[in-house]
Image: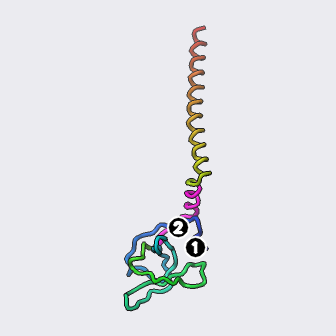
Amino acid sequence: MEPSISPGDVVVIKQSPFNQIKENDVITYRNGADFVTHRVTEVAKDESGSYFKTKGDANNTEDETKIRTEHLTGKVEWVLPKVGSIAEFLISPFGLSVMFFIVLVIIFSDKLFKRRNKKININEFEGEKS
């Protein structure tokens, strides 16, 4: 779907009735176990009823699958650039390691900071005695 939607972008979809989708709308539909986001190129009818023809913006040919009501997930409302890439990084082994390290730094810096404050307070107290 590039250039409108790039790998790593997150799409926010709104469930829409089949009859409210029109040509040029970008929809998400199920194709087996996968979700596909493509642009509607035509609303058509055959003996089984209405369906959409779709095509990815970066593709040269239309998709072979006829998208019917039972396939439709919804219409794309917003595209959040790169949010998916960030999420993929955070759940990768390296990303999880980085997050674990950051949490450890926060925990230990907090304990170190509290310990330093206690030492300062004890020294101030001892200084008042002298």
Q: CA distance from mark 1 to mark 2?
A: 9 Å
Q: Which residue is mark 1?
A: 4
Q: Tag count in the figure?
A: 2
Quadrant of the rendering where the N terminus is positioned: bottom right
* Amino acid at the residue labelled 1: Ser
Vertical placement of residue 119 versus 97, above or below: above
Q: What SS does tag 2 mark?
A: strand
Q: Residue at x 56, y 33 (%)?
A: 110
Q: Quadrant of residue 22?
A: bottom left
Q: Which residue is mark 2?
A: 79
Residue 88: percent from the left, percent from the top?
A: 57, 58
Q: Are marks 1 and 2 in contact (CB under 8 Å)?
A: yes
Q: Is residue 87 magenta?
A: yes
* Amino acid at the residue labelled 2: Val
Residue 87: percent from the left, percent from the top?
A: 55, 57
Quadrant of the rendering where the C terminus is positioned: top right
Residue 29: percent from the left, percent from the top?
A: 46, 74
Vertical placement of residue 98 versus 24, above or below: above
